[in-house]
Image (spheres, grey):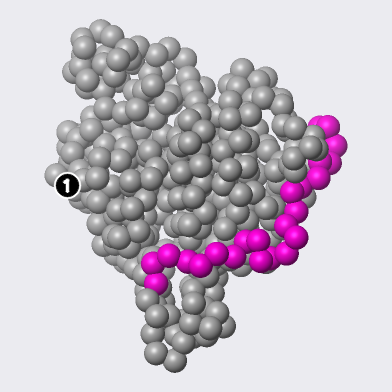
Amino acid sequence: MKDRVGRENKMHIGLFPDGQHEVPGCDRRSFLKGVSLPCLAACTGALAGTQGIVPLLAADSDAQFIREAQFYEKQPYRKIKCKLCPRECVIDDHERGYCGARENRGGTYYTLVHSRVATAHIDPIEKKPFFHFLPGAMAFSIATAGCNVNCKMCQNWEISQVRPEQVRSSFAPPARIAELARQNRCPVVAYTYSEPVIFYEYMTDTARAAHEAGVRSVVVTGGYVSPDPLTKLCKTVDAIKVDLKAYSEKFYKEIVNGEMKHVLKAIETIQKRGTWNEIVYLLIPTLNDSAAELQALAKWVKTDLGPDVPLHFSRFHPEYLLKNLPPTPLATLERAKAIADAEGLHYVYVGNVPGHPAESTYCPKCHKLIVERAGYTIGAMHIKGGKCRYCQQAIPGVWS
């Protein structure tokens, strides 16, 4: 499940012009004390904070957000064919693709959201969730408007299901994001909340700028992306978490408006490329929670990816177009974990249930607790040099 904006306590960030108010440093201790920074609110575009309103770095014009897009083919009569995601939209002159964030102008395809940040926050890395990537780190998290699917359970629909001009945004070029991450002691930039695939050029430019500043990059995505851009992305970022919406083509067609086969292929590609990968599966009552589907999912993960890929079963809360369904019962989450455990997966987690024992990491060999979690807080850590302190079993992940 995508980490949510505007619904939980989190550290917020305003994107400030040089020479104006600077953002105070933020570490985990400050975060846990509940210190609040000014923020760009995703739903309303309002900037508010305990220290009053801070000016945004406003764009002189929309032209600052426009760059020629990657991954498209020119067609006759000034049409273009987008090659970024499996939709492969064929777009007439002066029209946009399905995502609404890319436009054909005279036979040249442009992204409209380069450096066009609709929301920015500082979050614990566990909120993404990444459980095997720098536990306890804070992630400077950004998003633009737009998405290339339309999930009926989307928790960030206010920014994902709109066009860029419908949301107040700020101008934040890649070097500025890298600078803000360092200023706020965030070792990670996260591309999240909406769908990072649709702001691909901005994401990859920012990841390169972040790497030059000694900051890593992680992606939170639905995985609806074509092989060529995904392969290039794997070379640019440090970790990718995929929201696998269901293990059912019917669900993808009716609830997501996409095709599952492309997402499974994307996850397999990430694994083969060696980019750190975790999977989240949002369990929705009556729609994707049958024992048969969960068993098929677990078998696919073990056979095609391997038993060490972390699998997070996350609790659904009524949202967007699925407000008629109840939250996921705890028993359903625990049943899903039991099924995956029985198939031989080593790292199966229960999410959105703060304090549940299955939030923590246990060594698959000696079964002792090696990373203790309560919500987004890390307690005990018993991993040293990538190994269990108790039995020296290697624990896959990025730990330092």
* Quadrant hosting residue 197: bottom left
Q: Which element type, helix, strand or loop, lies under badge 1?
A: helix
Q: Position of residue 164 (x, y in %)?
A: 63, 64
Asked whether 59 falls inside the magenta stretch, the response is yes
**Which part of the image, by quadrant, shows the C terminus?**
top left
- The reply, left or right, for residue 169 in relation to residue 241 is right
Crowding near the residue tagged with mark 1, few <14, some 14–19, many ≥20 C-alpha atoms within 10 Å: some
Tell me which residue sits at (30%, 53%) in the image: 231
Q: Position of residue 295 (x, y in %)?
A: 21, 46
The residue identified by callout 1 is 304
Q: Position of residue 236 (x, y in %)?
A: 38, 45
Q: Residue furthest right?
A: 52
Tell me which residue sits at (48%, 36%) in the image: 212
Q: Nearer the viewer, residue 384 or 304?
A: 384
| Residues shaded magenta | 50-72
Q: Residue furthest left?
A: 303
Q: Nearer the viewer, residue 18 or 42?
A: 18
* Quadrant hosting residue 61: bottom right
- The reply, left or right, for residue 21 in relation to residue 305 is right
Most prominent secondary structure in the magenta stretch? loop
Asked whether 312 falls inside the magenta stretch, the response is no
Q: Nearer the viewer, residue 365 or 63?
A: 63
The disc labelled 1 sits on which kind of residue?
Asp
- The reply, left or right, for residue 10 in relation to residue 295 is right
